[in-house]
Amino acid sequence: MKKHLLIVLFAAFSACHKPQTTNLAGPWEPDYDVTRSEGAIKEFERKDAEHMPAPGGIVFTGSSSFTKWPNAVNDLAPLPIINRGFGGSTLPEVIHYSDRTITKYKPKTVVIYCENDMFGKKPKSPEQVRDAYVALVKKLREKQPDVQLYGVSLKPSPSRWAKREDVIKANKLIQDYIKKDKNHHYIDVWPVMLKNGRPDGAIFVSDSLHMNEEGYRRWTKVFRPILEKSV
């Protein structure tokens, strides 16, 4: 009887202390308000009211790796970059705001970078990240069937290196999807961000997540020749 009770107690303890994960193949629902970045979106709209970008540009959408690239327009000039990344965003948020941050500009090209989905309190599995990426693509194509898309690999960051296997798997799943999709290309930033097989600390700021000027200089070298083919 005592042995049975110990087994039950151990199982209960394990269940209570098991890290929260999500079903590999099941649907995923946000545990946060997808409108939490409304302030940032309204700031984009304020800027648009002052000067609306011309149709046919290249929209950058996604999370803070774009937000913290304030010189993207100058770094990639004369490419018509419209940077609409907003910090901390996830794919469900990008989908929610896509009409106000992407398709309203009638872009010729959209570049997608969003890496936070596997790192919140309720992380997605690599498969669910891929599914969310596909959902974004489908929504964009509903408005612009022929829009040209570029998916950027989730970058190797020192602060998130412990989950690199999940990041690598998510990248592979997204890349496999992109290969089968029309007008869709994959941009791999890993080769320019690694040193001796690990993230190069010299291109990151103190949080070991976001990049410094050297990091964006390397991204510019990767992005420019690829995006020049899209205009």
Image: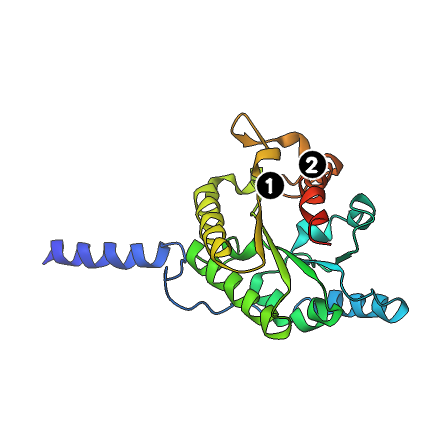
Point out which mark residue 176 bears.
Answer: none
- SS at circle 2: helix
Dot 1 and dot 2 residues touching (CB under 8 Å): yes
Location of residue 35 by image quarter: bottom right
Find residue 98 and report its horizontal and vertical position in percent: 65, 69
Characterize the local packing of mark 2: few (<14), some (14-19) or many (20 or more) Cα atoms within 10 angstroms: some
- SS at circle 1: loop
Position of 65 with respect to 7 (left or right) is: right
Is 204 or 186 nearer to us in this picture?
186
Look at 56% across and 47% down and name the residue there.
Answer: 153
Residue 205 can be seen, yes or no: no
Look at 68% across and 56% down and name the residue there.
Answer: 87
Position of 190 with respect to 224 (left or right) is: left
Find residue 126 and report its horizontal and vertical position in percent: 44, 54
Look at 70% across and 52% down and name the residue there.
Answer: 66
Q: Identify the residue position indicated by label 2 in the image.
A: 218
Q: Considering only vertical position in the picture, is 188 above or below 11?
A: above
Q: Identify the residue position indicated by label 1 in the image.
A: 189
